Image (cartoon, helix red, strand yellow):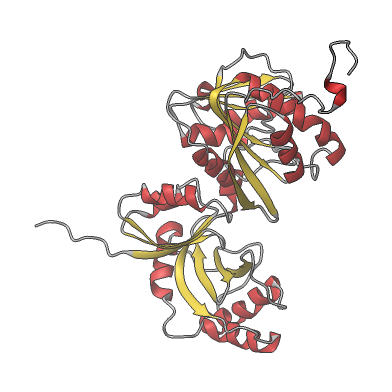
Amino acid sequence: PGQSKMAARRFLATFNSGLGEAVAETLRSVPGLTIDEINNEAGFAMISATCSLAALTELRSLKGLYASLGQFSIPADLSAAEMEGLLVQWAPKDDVPWEAALACWREKNGETAPIFRVTAEKAPGYTHAMKSPAIAGAMGLGVLNRFHWPVSMTGFSLNIFALFVSGAAHVGIALTDERSQIRNRVVYSRTALQPHIAFNLSLLAGIRAGDVVMDPMCGCGTIPIEASFACPGAFILCGDVYSRNVEATRANLQTQKGLSQRVQVMHWDATQLPLREGSIDVIVCDMPWGQRSGTFAANCKLYPRLFREWRRVLRLGGRVHALTLEKGLMKNVLDTQRGWALERAIPVNVGYQVTLYTLVTVVPAPRVPKALPSGPSDHVDGTSG
C-alpha cells in the first residue's frame, strides 16, 4: 500500500516589501508548496506546504518563516485601550491553531519547554498610535494567561511574531532565527545588506548560467556570496577600494566549501576597473547612499564616474541592478550619459524606502547637431544683403 500524503501545513513567510517577485519565484520552486496569498507591498506570503520543514527553512529569499497561528481582524480607528483589549484576548481564543503550530516548532526544536517572547512589526503603510513594543506586550499577556510559560526577551526558545497590515494581524511561531541574517559571515561591514535582500536582488537580476557577474563595490561580500547561490552556474567577480573590505570578503568566502572557487575578489577602484571593454554581463551593486556611507556631495561626483566606467565594461545589452536612495543622482545619470536605458525602478523597503534600478546598455543615439540660428546673420558668404 502507498504511503499517505502529509497533510498541508500553513506558514507565514516574510520578506522586504518590493521583493515579492523574487520571493514568489523561490516559493514556486518548492514541490508540494502552494502560495495562498502574497502581498508585495506589505512584505508577506501565506503558504500551504506538504514538504519537509527543512525545504522551507533553507529558502534563502525569506526574511522569516513562521508556523501560522492564523490572523485576526483589526477594525479601523481603534483607540489604544480598545486595541490593547483586542490583543490580550487573541491568544485564548479556541480558533487559534496552537496545536499545529507548536507541532512544527517541536519538530524543529525538540521537546524543549517553551520560554517565550512576542515581537510585533508594522508593515509599510500600517499606522496606529500604539507602538510595536506595547502591541507585543499586550499579546504576550494573552499568551501568558493561556499557557503560563516563562517569559524572556533574550533567553527565549519560542518567538511569537505578529505582522500588522491594513485591517488585520498575521501571527506565527518563528521557525528561523536571527542567525540566518548573518549567514556566511565571520567579518562584518557597517553598511552590509541583509543576506536575504542580496539573494533577492540577485534573482531579480535574471542571472543565467555562464554570465560574468560583477559587484564593483562589494563591502564584506554579501551580494557576491548570495549571487553564487542564486545562480551557481555564473562566474562572480567582485572588488572594493578598501583593502579591509577585500579581506573581509575573502574571510567570508571561507565559511562554506566551494565559495572561494565560485567568487573572485580583487582590490580595485570601481571608477577605474582593470577590465577590458564589454567583458561583463551583469552588475549587481548596493550603491553608497550618502547615509551610513559617504555623503551626498561626494556621491554627486562619484555616480557619474561609476556609470561611465560601468558602461565601458558592460557588453551591449548588459545590465546594472543598483540599489540606492539617490533618486536625483540616478535621474542625472540617465539624463546626461548616452548609452543607458532605464528598464525598471522597483521601490524596496529596507526600514526606509530605497529603489532598485535596472539600467540596460544600448547603442548610443547619434548626437543631433545644434541648429544654426535663423535670421539675417545666417548669411556667411561675405556679401552684403
Q: Residue at x 87, y 23 (%)?
A: 377
Q: Is residue 208 above or below residue 76?
A: above
Q: Residue at x 63, y 30 (%)?
A: 340
Quarter of the C terminus within the rendering? top right
Extreme residue in the top direction: 382
Q: Residue at x 61, y 83 (%)?
A: 76
Q: Is residue 375 above or below residue 13?
A: above
Question: In terms of depth relative to the viewer, which is nearer, 141 or 222?
Answer: 222
Q: Is residue 31 above or below residue 288?
A: below
Q: Is residue 332 above or below residue 314?
A: below
Choose top left, top right, bottom left or bottom right for residue 135. bottom right
Q: Is residue 354 left or right of residue 19?
A: right
Question: In terms of depth relative to the viewer, which is nearer, 210 or 163?
Answer: 210
Choose top left, top right, bottom left or bottom right for residue 358. top right
Can the viewer see residue 159?
yes
Q: How many numbered marks, from 0 up?
A: 0
Q: Residue at x 61, y 14 (%)?
A: 277
Question: In terms of depth relative to the viewer, which is nearer, 177 or 282?
Answer: 282
Q: List x then y, in percent, for residue 302.
A: 79, 30
Extreme residue in the left direction: 1
Extreme residue in the right direction: 384
Q: List x then y, in percent, for residue 144.
A: 57, 80
Q: List x then y, in percent, for residue 349.
A: 64, 54
Q: List x then y, in percent, for residue 101.
A: 42, 69
Can the viewer see residue 254?
no
Quarter of the N terminus within the rendering? bottom left
Question: In terms of depth relative to the viewer, which is nearer, 191 or 288?
Answer: 288
Choose top left, top right, bottom left or bottom right for residue 11. bottom left
Q: Is residue 173 left or right of residue 29?
A: right
